[in-house]
Image (cartoon, rainbow, N blue to C red):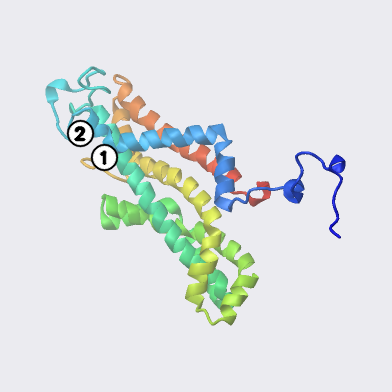
């Protein structure tokens, strides 16, 4: 005999038994990091400012319609005007176009150096941590020797040997920069290589190269993103400092450091020639640093809820 339920004892709106189940949407680590990053107003403002600066570095020189290499001696040291938005420098060149071309060069140098640093640091640190033993000891001693070299002395020697050019500056900046990345990757992989999925891959016969590239390095993505966000402004600042001191790029090559160096020579009479490139440099470095702080908080697994 089928059992019936008295309708007086049925709770309205709860006919299905799964109504009491607590459903929580599943989100990935990247989605959770992006959610927390969006809640950080300073990081988001920095991201918007960076996007605008990059767009101006790419399209800024064409917007004003001026050639950054064209010299007009009769228009030298002019104040800002409708034709020359930032004025002109001591050779009559349009300062607006030169500032954004310099920003483009500085950003490209920083991006290339960061890519080289991440690639070499990941591979070196991954091999060092995975094999361990005497391999780890020897490779770690090499890093310690590289990091003990005076940075400025290495840069000066490289620039003297290779000359003042963009490729030589890239080599000078990348000689020892990958060491910190390698040490950071080594520390993360030392914790990961005893994981079950790594032992399963070893049992299935996966080669060390495949384990490092396919299983270990992807799990260091959080620290690599943070390392990238902090390395780019450091390279921009280093390039600008070296060019300002006369060690880096030299005219006719241009960068923010070169333009600031030229503006410094006439700042007593024409301070805007120093103010505009210095302000762009400060905005780029500050935005990257603030975004890096936001990424550090967003990628911290201890803060994940």
Residue where numbered disc 2 is placed: 68
Q: What residue is at 30 percent from the left and 29 percent from the top?
A: 263
For the residue labelled by badge 2, is the local secondary structure a helix, a strand or a loop?
loop
What is the x, y in percent for residue 62? Answer: 22, 33
Q: Between disc 1 and disc 2, whose residue precedes?
A: 2
Tell me where residue 15 sits by quadrant. Answer: top right
Residue where numbered disc 1 is placed: 254
Mark 1–mark 2 CB contact (< 8 Å)? yes
Residue 139 showing in the rendered view: no
Q: What residue is at 43 percent from the left and 46 percent from the top?
A: 232
Is residue 60 or residue 281 the one in the foreground?
Answer: 60
Work out how far the residue at label 1 is from the one at label 2, CA to CA, in angstroms: 10 Å
Q: Is residue 222 above or below residue 8?
A: below
What is the x, y in percent for residue 50? Answer: 42, 36
What is the x, y in percent for residue 284? Answer: 42, 36
Outermost residue, front side: 1
Tell me where residue 131 sits by quadrant. Answer: bottom right
């Amino acid at each position: 005999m089928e059992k019936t339920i008295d309708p007086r004892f049925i709770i309205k709106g709860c006919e299905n038994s799964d109504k009491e189940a607590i459903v929580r949407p599943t989100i990935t680590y990247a989605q959770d990091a992006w959610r927390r990053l969006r809640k950080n107003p300073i990081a988001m403002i920095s991201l918007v400012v960076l996007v605008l600066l990059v767009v101006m570095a790419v399209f800024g020189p064409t917007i004003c319609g001026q050639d950054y290499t064209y010299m007009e001696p009769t228009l030298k040291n002019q104040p800002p005007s409708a034709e020359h938005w930032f004025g002109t420098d001591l050779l009559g060149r349009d300062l607006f176009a030169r500032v954004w071309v310099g920003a483009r060069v500085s950003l490209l140098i920083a991006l290339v150096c960061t890519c080289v640093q991440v690639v070499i640091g990941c591979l070196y640190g991954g091999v060092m941590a995975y094999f361990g033993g005497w391999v780890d000891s020897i490779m770690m001693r090499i890093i310690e020797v590289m990091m003990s070299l005076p940075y400025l002395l290495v840069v000066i020697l490289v620039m003297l040997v290779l000359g003042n050019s963009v490729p030589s500056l890239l080599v000078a900046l990348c000689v020892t920069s990958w060491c910190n990345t390698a040490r950071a990757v080594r520390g993360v992989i030392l914790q990961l290589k005893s994981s079950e999925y790594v032992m399963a891959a070893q049992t299935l016969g996966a080669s060390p190269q495949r384990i490092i590239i396919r299983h270990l390095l992807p799990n260091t993505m959080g620290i690599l993103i943070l390392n990238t966000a902090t390395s780019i402004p450091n390279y921009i600042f280093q390039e600008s400092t070296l060019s300002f001191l006369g060690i880096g790029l030299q005219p006719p090559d241009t960068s923010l450091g070169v333009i600031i160096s030229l503006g410094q020579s006439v700042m007593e009479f024409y301070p805007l020639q120093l103010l505009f490139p210095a302000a762009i440099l400060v905005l780029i470095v500050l935005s990257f640093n603030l975004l890096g702080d936001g990424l550090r908080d967003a990628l911290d697994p201890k803060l994940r809820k």
